[in-house]
Amino acid sequence: QVQLVESGGGLVQAGGSLRLSCAASRSIFSINAMGWYRQAPGKQRELVARITTAGSTVYADSVKGRFTISRDNAKNTVYLQMNSLKPEDTAVYYCNTVPLGGPRWGRGTLVTVSS
């Protein structure tokens, strides 16, 4: 069973940057579009960025121009570069396939943005 392991979260001040990484236990990236999802306290999980196998990207309006998703199929890793962070970006961030239906959710990585 494929396992997803997210890392790179932390506490950062508003306006700061973080880079998240997601590694899979075996290669799923080469055959699936991948996405970064987030779940803020009291809210539903939402998809914020996705990248196809060909490298095409789509972003939620709330992060467009600030976040960049990328992937390295050889390393079985997908990244999320987050710049100009806002307090409303505070959430647990997860990666998974797009659409869902593949691996189980990992534990996620917590991003906290202070004002």
Image: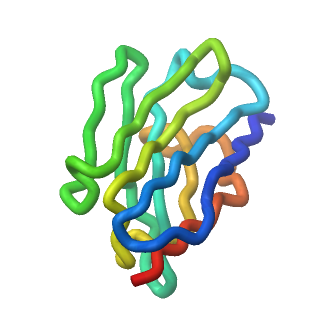
Residue at x 40%, y 69% (from the top left corner): 89
Relative placement, left or right, of 72 versus 106 is left
What residue sits 46% from the left and 67% below the top?
45
Q: Is residue 59 above or below residue 40?
A: above
Whole-percent x and y of residue 111? 55, 67
Q: Quadrant of residue 75?
A: top right
Along the viewing direction, whichever of 89 and 56 lies nearer the viewer: 89
Drawn side of residue 25 relative to residue 46, left or right: right
Q: Is residue 40 left or right of residue 60?
A: right
Percent position of residue 36, x then y: 47, 48
Above or below, 22 against 41 in this view is: above
Which residue is most to the bottom? 42
* Coordinates of residue 24 in the picture (x, y in percent): 71, 33
Scheme of image coloration: rainbow
Quarter of the picture holding the C terminus: bottom left
Q: As rendered, which of 41 and 100 lies closer to the eye? A: 41
Which quarter of the rendering shows the N terminus? top right
Q: Is residue 110 above or below residue 28?
A: below
Q: Toward the viewer: 113 or 70?
A: 113
Residue at the image position 27 percent from the left and 46 percent from the top = 59
The spot of residue 8 in percent (x, y) is 63, 51
Q: Quadrant of residue 87?
A: bottom left
The residue closer to the viewer here, 85 or 2, is: 85
